[in-house]
Amino acid sequence: MATTLAIDIGGTGLKMIALDEAGTPVTERTRVLTPSPPTADAVLAGLTGMLGSHGEYDRVSVGFPGVIEAGVVKTAANLDPSWIGVDVVAALSERTGKPTRAANDADIQGWGVINGKGVELVLTLGTGLGSAIFVDGELVPNLELGHHPFEKGDTYEERLGKVALKAAGKKKWLRRVKRAITQLESTFNYTTLHLGGGNAKKVEGDLPENVQIGLNVAGLLGGIALWRKP
Ligand code: BGC
């Protein structure tokens, strides 16, 4: 049975856990703060320092907070520009000595929460605003709704990300989340909207029936899905 080391590179924290093939954790999740500035070298050094706590594993999955194409970082809005062009798959397979796959963090989170039916939109409320869309369980990779205009000349990420939550306060932020849901429902006509990420637990009150709040740990659990295809 193959063990997967699932790594989540976040704008605020770096997380790791080892999972068996069913997605059951086989080590305790570890977390360290993302280095500041979050350069490629500093983050990779931080991750290297965490590897020792996860025993033996056979393969590695990496969730990255930006667009990933064929293992290479194309955007990194909440990290450092030194990431652009970095082959994150090569960097981590070198450091772990194991086969490695990488995808956008919201895409991975999505795999951890979807049910495979109809159109499923995933929004992650964390440092940035992550998004992913699946049709009958098939991913359309690298949806970047976060940087799309939302309201008042600001993007979804500028209205709903970590900085916005702090500046606006929870009450105002929650009203924005609900307006965003209304707008996204009429844009995507999704079957289900999944809300995840560290701040999803702050979403409360009445929500439409087709909105579900996922577990934050899904960000790591979806790492198994990266290995489902040959
Ligand atoms: C990035 C996305 C990422 C999201 C959450 C955004 O700023 O552009 O790729 O999924 O933050 O980390």
Image (cartoon, rainbow, N blue to C red):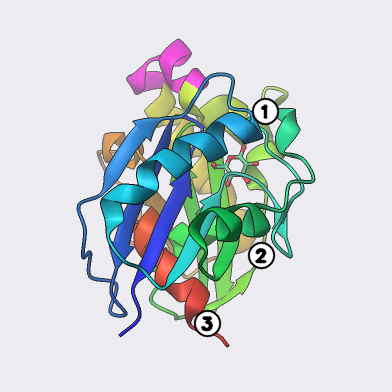
Kindly report the distance in space between the C-alpha atoms of the residues bearing marks 3 and 2. 14 Å
Q: Amino acid at mark 2?
A: Pro
User: Can you tell which of label 2 and label 1 is closer to the viewer?
Assistant: 1
Amino acid beneath label 1: Asp
Is 56 left or right of 175, judged from the image as shown? left
Q: Residue at x 33, y 49 (%)?
A: 52
At horizontal 44% and vertical 53% (from top left) the residue drawn is 7
Question: Is residue 34 visible to us here?
Answer: yes
Q: Which residue is mark 1?
A: 80
Q: With 151 as the anchor, is 118 left or right in this view?
A: left
Disc 1 crowd rating (10 Å Cα; few below 14, some 14-19, many 20+) is some
Tell me the kind of residue under disc 3: Asp
Quadrant where ligand 1 appears: top right
Residue 174, above or below 201: above
Q: Nearer the viewer, mark 3 or mark 2?
A: 2
Q: How far apart are labels 1 and 3 at the CA level?
A: 35 Å
Q: In terms of secondary structure, where does tag 2 sit?
A: loop
Instruction: Using the image as rendered, state which of residue 155 and residue 163 is in the foreground.
Output: 163
User: What's the mark number on residue 141?
Assistant: 2
Q: Are marks 2 and 1 in contact (CB under 8 Å)?
A: no
The answer to whether mark 2 is within 8 Å of ligand 1 is no
Q: Which residue is mark 3?
A: 136
Foreground mark, 1 or 3, reads 1
Which range of residues does the magenta coloring cover? 163-172
Tell which of 30 and 188 is nearer to you: 30
Quarter of the image where the C terminus is located: bottom right
> Which element type, helix, strand or loop, lies under badge 1?
loop
